[in-house]
Image (cartoon, rainbow, N blue to C red):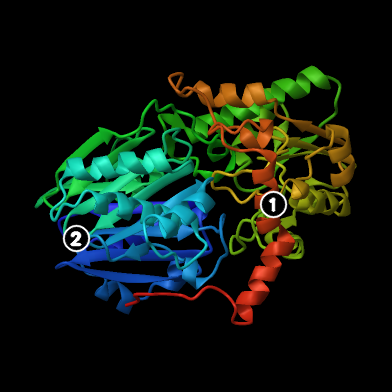
Amino acid sequence: MCGLVGIVGKSAVAPEIYDALTVLQHRGQDAAGIMTCSGGRFSQRKGEGLVRDVFRQQHMQKLQGSLGIGHVRYPTAGSSGMALAQPFYVNSPYGIALAHNGNLTNSEQLGRELFQDDLRHLNTDSDSEVLLNVLAHEMQTLGKLSPTADDIFTAVAAVHRRCRGGYAAVALVVNYGVVGFRDPRGIRPLVVGSRESAQGTEYMLASESVALDVLGFSVISDVAPGEAVFIDMDGVLHRRQCAENPGMYPCIFEHVYFARPDSLMDGISVYKTRMRQGEALGKKIRRLRPDLQIDVVIPIPDTSRIAAQSMAHELGIKFREGLMKNRYIGRTFIMPGQSERKKSVRQKLNPVPLEFEGKNVMLVDDSIVRGTTCRQIIEMARDAGAAQVYFASAAPPVRYPNVYGIDMPSASELIAHGRSVEEVCELIGADWLVYQDIEDLVSCSLEGNPEVDGFDCSVFDGNYITGDIDQNYLDRVESLRNDDAQSEQRAAQQAGGGDVGIHNDV
């Protein structure tokens, strides 16, 4: 999961890309980068850390140009570190920079093809660099000194034919403009908007509509699955469907956890979807345990708050903020290593004893992934004096790895994998556990836009909609991305054995 921004404006865009990236910070806290273009030259600043830590005033002053792209990163494929910060850049043809959200499921095959057939060098193990080089090769094969919008769309169509998986990307082509495109299943999000200025119309691409809202851009539409959007140097918007037989199957985990609730994704309000999730969960609780005595409903901040409120309303039970969040601790489920996650949970949340002492408490979370957070929070609740601790998940059991851009690669690290609800309940230490039904979850999202063909629910049902995932692939991903493997990678990097970094820093 990453955040993308691309702007073609009438004045310097770096400050606005910076602002947009801060709004999308929830989508990536590992690294950040901005690249702009002015006078036929790229300027770049990228590094590890939060947006506020990567960029200083002197950097922003040097990021000149009226068009540019930005990226915030969570590591999902490949290792992490400075060398993996985006955007990535190739000088041939034209000079192209690219920022990517998602995972290519055939990146290993594409890497071999790029080396053996396309004669291109890859400097990292990132599938984002693979995607950039595939795009660059397809543009180079056209043999055009001055590519048109049609040429760029032809290249993107070839990218769709070669690449599989979930991906959204924004690319900056020096002296020509910015192009954005989305995989043919629409798994990863991308939206385009416009704004009128005194000098003319400006355009923006972003992972979530909220980034457009903050900068005063009006949403034109989501980029359709398989579609490419190109904004040229003159500020003219071009659009074309570049995929054969596209379908709309966005990642439902965006609605569960990732996206900000004030975003619209594929015409669906994330806020309303989470309200419906809570209502559906409340109805299930009433159906399964009509006599269950619950004194108070308490959300696990922040993403479960909306669902917990609507669930409490549905059940007619008091809603209380019983857990106070330290907002300077990042998202825990994708932190490197189980020990780091355990440590961070205690730093992140503190109970309000008044809301727990002597009460039957229903804790509500958006999902249960590894079980680290909920297990420790249940312990906190008991330490704070709770009589009974029940636990509700607004999402179904996460039983299968995600291969489309979310860092859940290892089935063995998912607490619900191969276990019943009762077994999970015992492991996390709850007195009762209830999960959302997958049919209800899909219905909650589908109600926002009935024209959506379906959703990528692979983490819940194991149905990988790209049709190219088998057990051998999952085993290989797990061997590369489980906690032990990542620990070894970090140790190698610290010892000086990581990827060589090629950086054009300002």
As drawn, the residue found furthest toward the front would be 116
- In the shown orientation, is residue 32 left or right of residue 16? right
Nearest to N terminus: mark 2 or mark 1: 2
- Front-most of 506 and 428? 506
Asked if one can make out residue 23 in the rendered structure from this viewpoint, the answer is: no
For mark 1, give the secondary structure.
helix
**Which residue does the image show at 41% across and 31% down from the upper left?**
266
Judging by the rendered image, the residue that carries numbered circle 2 is 66
In this rendering, the answer to whether 251 lies above or below 289 is: below
Q: Where residue 391 sits in the image (x, y, percent)?
A: 79, 38
Q: Specify the quadrant of the image occupied by residue 435.
A: top right
In-image side of 419 versus 64 (left or right): right
Residue 393 in view in this figure: yes
Is 223 above or below relative to 216? above
Q: Nearer the viewer, residue 373 or 4?
A: 4
**Left or right for 386, reference 105:** right
Q: Position of residue 392 (x, y in %)?
A: 75, 35
Question: Looking at the image, is 489 positioned above or below residue 171?
Answer: below
The amino acid marked with disc number 1 is Glu
What kind of residue is marked 2? Ser
Residue at 22 percent across and 48 percent down: it is 142
- Asked which secondary structure carries label 2, the reply is loop
Spatial CA distance of label 2 from label 1 is 42 Å
Residue in the image at 50% along x and 43% along y: 259
* Frontmost residue, 472 versus 12: 472
Q: Residue 400, position in %: x, y? A: 70, 39
Residue located farthest toward the bottom when viewing the structure as drawn = 495
Give the position of the C terminus as an image quadrant. bottom left
Q: Nearer the viewer, residue 29 or 149?
A: 149
**Which residue in the structure is indicated by mark 1?**
478
